Image: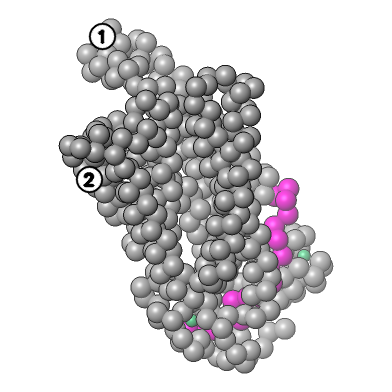
Amino acid sequence: MATLADAPHRQDSSAFPSSPSTLPAASPVAIAARNMRFVFLAALACAFVVTHIPRLAVGTSDSPIDKLIHASTYGVLAALLLLARWWRPVWPALAVLAAWAALDEITQAIPGLGRSADLDDWLADVTGMVIAAAFFVAAAPVGTGAARLLCQRRRIAGDTLLCKFTAWFHLATVGVLGFAAGAPLGVLLDSFFVRKGPQPWQYGLIGGVLGAGIGMHALWEYGVRSRLRRLGETRPCIACGSAMEPQAESCPVCSRARAQTDWAPVAPLQGSEELVACLMPILLSLAGIVVVSASAIVLITVLRLRSEWVMRGDTWYRMLPPDARVLGDIALVALFGAWGLRRCRVRIARSVDRCGERCLGCGYDLHATTPEVHAGTCHECGGGFVRVH
Ligand SMILES: [Zn+2]
Ligand SMILES: [Zn+2]
């Protein structure tokens, strides 16, 4: 299988330019980022208008899920801002959005709006942003070789979807349908189980948002997977997503040289191995949640009467509206969940990175049969492998 043509194709997996600003404006990656930026700005404008409608009941303390609305609004905004890829590190995006949230709160204090500026609201905004950022980091590319390449393929598949209007239209439609399905379910659950209710619409809102989120995520996964299958045949540029002629040596848009490994098939890792890799992170994150909550309770109980700061903090926490404390619990679970997800992905990537040594599909040693090629198939099971250095 080893041929002379393999020689010039040694590639550095860290060489995928992931920032759209370093890629030509006409490339699908740059177009997708532009679309995402437009959607972020539109969402930001909508949120600003809604928070400044005079005397709106949703955003005031009369509403028992006010803090949850704050956190989820800014969580969505943070996710959109991070996906818009203006900055590579996460913290500048968070700092800008936190400053914006502060401005948003302060301008609500303008007399005549009938709204008020509230530090607790801002803390809820920041909590939502931190949760979104944690999952963004957890979902960031992992691995160094083959695993990194698979992450890059997924990114290109996603970006070639997001540069099309139809993909956004489908996502929006499924979001609306998911909301329409989830909202009555939320109201039903409220009337059957919670019975809190003078304002059942609030549980309808929670159900609707969850329904929209689940629907859009499912459609996104389906879209990316079917696109990945297609891209394996059309083999566009792995750096910028532009279409390439089958025989072209380099990308016409960003001029990156094509590598044999770019879209070569890779056998999927066995499900049992994924499970083994994920077992420890899942157990550890569950244990982390239990340990942190238990030790917080013990520490506060012990120190409450000895330290004035603990006393003050505890009193502040007890005075918070119930939904703010629920938000605190959600944040604890979400942060450990994001950590566990990241560890699972890192551990799976470690196995996938070794796919040139050992077939991922059957565990067959690949060194003996095909020592030199960059991409090929396992003699034992026929599954593909790549060697990325
Ligand atoms: Zn390119
Ligand atoms: Zn095999």
Image quarter for residue 322?
top left
Magenta-highlighted residues: 256-273
User: Who's the residue at 59% across and 31% down the image?
Assistant: 187
Horizontal arrangement in the rendering, residue 272 relative to residue 332 (left or right): right
Residue 269 in magenta? yes
Q: Nearer the viewer, residue 387 or 370?
A: 387
Task: Determine which residue is flagged by label 1.
Answer: 306
Give the answer, above or below, for where 335 lies relative to 319: below
User: Who's the residue at 72% across and 83% down the image?
Assistant: 1
Task: Determine which residue is flagged by label 2.
Answer: 103
Residue 375 in magenta? no
Image quarter for residue 281?
top right
Q: Position of residue 71 (x, y in %)?
A: 40, 39
Q: Main secondary structure of the magenta part?
A: loop
Determine which of the numbered discs, if any, sits on residue 176 in the image: none
Identify which amino acid the numbered label 1 is placed on.
Arg
Mark 2 packing: few (<14 Cα in 10 Å), some, or many (20+)? few
Q: First in sequence: mark 1 or mark 2?
A: 2
Query: Which is in the foreground here, disc 1 or disc 2?
Result: 2
Horizontal arrangement in the rendering, residue 207 relative to residue 83 (left or right): right
Q: Position of residue 33 (x, y in %)?
A: 43, 68
Label 1 vs label 2: CA separation?
A: 38 Å
Q: Position of residue 189 (x, y in %)?
A: 62, 28
Secondary structure type for disc 2: helix
User: Who's the residue at 46% across and 79% down the image?
Assistant: 27
Q: What kind of colouring is applied to the model shown? A: one colour
Mark 1 packing: few (<14 Cα in 10 Å), some, or many (20+)? few
Q: Nearer the viewer, residue 298 or 68?
A: 68
> Residue lying furthest top in this view?
305
Secondary structure type for disc 1: loop
> Residue lying furthest left in this view?
111
Identify which amino acid the numbered label 2 is placed on.
Leu
